[in-house]
Image (tube, coloured by chain):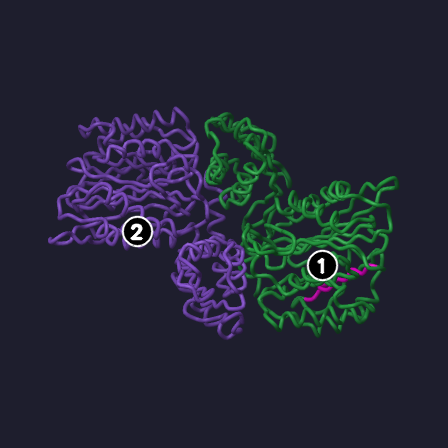
Chain colours: A green, B purple
Amino acid sequence: MTFSVAGFRFAGCAAGIKKAGGLDLGLIVADQPVVAAGVFTRNLVRAAPVDVSIERLRLGRARAVLANSGNANACTGAEGMAATLASTQAAAGLLGLEATQVLPASTGVIGSVLPAAKLEAALPGLVERLSADGAEEFAKAICTTDRWHKIAHGTLKTAGGPPASVLGIVKGAGMIHPDLGPAPTATQGSGPLHATMLAFFVTDAKVERSALQSALERAVELSFNACSVDGDTSTNDTVLALASGLAGPANEAALFEGLLPVCRELAKQMVLDGEGAQHAVEIRVEGLADDAAARTVAKAVATSLLVKTALFGKDANWGRLLAAAGRAGVAFDPGAASVSIAGSRIFDKGKPLGAAAEAVATRGMTEPSYGIVMTLGNGPGSFTYLTCDLGHGYVDVNAGYRS
Amino acid sequence: MTFSVAGFRFAGCAAGIKKAGGLDLGLIVADQPVVAAGVFTRNLVRAAPVDVSIERLRLGRARAVLANSGNANACTGAEGMAATLASTQAAAGLLGLEATQVLPASTGVIGSVLPAAKLEAALPGLVERLSADGAEEFAKAICTTDRWHKIAHGTLKTAGGPPASVLGIVKGAGMIHPDLGPAPTATQGSGPLHATMLAFFVTDAKVERSALQSALERAVELSFNACSVDGDTSTNDTVLALASGLAGPANEAALFEGLLPVCRELAKQMVLDGEGAQHAVEIRVEGLADDAAARTVAKAVATSLLVKTALFGKDANWGRLLAAAGRAGVAFDPGAASVSIAGSRIFDKGKPLGAAAEAVATRGMTEPSYGIVMTLGNGPGSFTYLTCDLGHGYVDVNAGYRS
């Protein structure tokens, strides 16, 4: 299957950045300067490419994305910054652009300086490979511990014309618990935040920059910012959106409606690919005073280690679900709470429904994807948080990542 | 080794509460009514014995503690409450006390009603076993997934006399991340909180109730509330302190100074016994504006899954340490940060010191217990948080706990 969006070309190649070899350098090039928006990790410790992309996005337009796996170029100081600047300068030179039109993104091991010479050596071949249907190759080039590359596409309503296209590409498997925001302000680092996630969206819709930025932020809030693999956060989280304007005009509402399902599909793929995970589980909390309260509880449940190991063990353990909800700092009456797993009610208005009900739920927990619903009251607030099980695979991947 | 404190007798027995058998019911009895204080889980979802002990502690004095393992009696509604009341009533009857003088505590599986009939059948034999040197038997009776029972003892300065004794007994291995506070108020559930931890302290010092309560809270804050196995919180966390007054008088300062090392020793044993853990690791954060900021950062690092799996893998991964610190919401300059593991500096003022330094640190990470120091600035604030590695053992214990 190939995907293309008018105005964009893609490529991926093996630049020798990954010790084990394989595709590790990707390039997206727009035929003309395009409208660009982005959200980034709120981690106080930001990698050099994040700082550079934040700065360059202030121009509002861009021509290219240069993304690599195998090296995050984080905690690498002035030397790392120089490597990021040199590699984007090299790409710009080959493409006949200004360096400021090239947005960098990196993922991989923290603490090693990006090997700019390797990137520069690979760039001529990479530029030659650019093609309208190279998105899959690009998607593969940005993978690290991902078990598969992740692409989703959708459409955007335009004013009076045929729908525009939107193509999304994401990488991410561990250190996944995004909390992305726009370019950092004085409040940077004031929120929790998490993930090594790189995501790129291209659309041919004609959009205002502010509409694209706002729609992207809103869609991310309900997708990437509402999913968690391990509750940890990356120094490198980056989401970029580029709009070529070759199709009809789309306003913020259309952008949001078009981006959201693509973001959600990618978030689900990412969680399903959670390091060692076998199940993507939607934690839905409802019946609280407002959505913010429901989000707080859903997040506490979705990030609980005891919940996640119970999911791994296919244990319909409503006790751990309620205990995790109870420490979220949101008031509810445990005696009125109900819990369903995979469509089977196992705890009803404060009372366990017993082994037979749990056995049905346990069967549902063998599915790759299922939902848990916790009804904690009669209020209108609800929120759905995406999580995964945590088992031996996660330990294997993360205990020896650098070795 | 035996431990005794004037005025107290202890016992433990097998009441058949645990499916697998073994000691599961413990009793502490004071010869006379004694001064009593306590702190409890701040989880909104509290087990019946927690509610009962909170209520009975309002009297300020107690005569006995009845503690069981194998069943937490949490999320068990009115039936669970009746079982807790019945079993303490039975103990009181045998001991010639009021039921309100018996403080209950339970730990084990959530969601099954405490089998009060089993407790009642075992109680006569348990009472017969009471002896001044029965603390070890009691300590064994409250263990669940603990690999060993945990006792520590110390002394308390008294006014003008010989030191008084303090004996502490704790159980806890998983669901450990205590956040204990005094009896819940309107703000209950407003903090994070974590742990299935039961701890009991007895002293023969003569104390005021308010001094004992205050000293206990302060000592817990710097020990149990500053350690984490899995960041999860129990419905049952309970810490009780009883003072017989048979030795000399101790004021709050003396109580705090005497309790703190005992609490810390027990916290360390608990973390070292973290489910599947092989290393107890002190995360010390220093150089921030104040201790509260340092605590926030230390906690973020101590509870990071990526950090804990790196500890398991003996990976001197300063990148994960800094990334976890960076998401704590506390401002610091990563370019001025330094990190040492097991006494070996591996990251100095923003720069990694390379493979040789990391190799030395890695050797230190094979020790059962070591420290990590993160210096994040020049400020006076510091805090030490105790954590452990997380590996396959944790997954094994928690994926199949109920089966």
Q: Secondary structure at mark 1?
A: helix
Characterize the magenta stretch by its predominant secondary structure.
strand
**Secondary structure category for the residue under label 2:** helix
Q: Amino acid at mark 2?
A: Cys
The part of the image, by quadrant, that contains residue A45 is: bottom right
- In-front residue for pair B83/B226: B226
Q: Quadrant of residue B12?
A: top left
Q: Which mark is residue B263?
A: 2
Locate residue B209 relative to residue B177 in the image: left or right. Answer: left
Out of B94 and B117, give the one closest to the viewer. B94
Give how far across and how far down residue A260 sits, in percent: 71, 43
Q: Position of residue A105 (x, y in %)?
A: 69, 61
Position of A147 relative to A385 (above/below):
below
Q: Which mark is residue B66?
A: none
Looking at this view, name the residue that lies furthest to the left.
B161
* Residue B281 % position (x, y): 41, 59
| Residue plotted at (15% across, 47% down) | B249
* Image quadrant where one finds the C terminus of chain A: bottom right
Q: Where is mark 1, residue-wise?
A: A57
Badge 1: chain ID: A
Mark 2 belongs to chain: B
Q: Is residue B64 magenta?
A: no
Instruction: Name the residue type under label 1.
Output: Leu
Residue depth check, mark 1 versus mark 2: number of the one nearer the observer: 1
Q: Residues in magenta?
A: A21-30
User: Does residue B16 sit above or below B4 in this rendering?
Assistant: above
Q: Nearer the viewer, residue B135 or A232?
A: A232
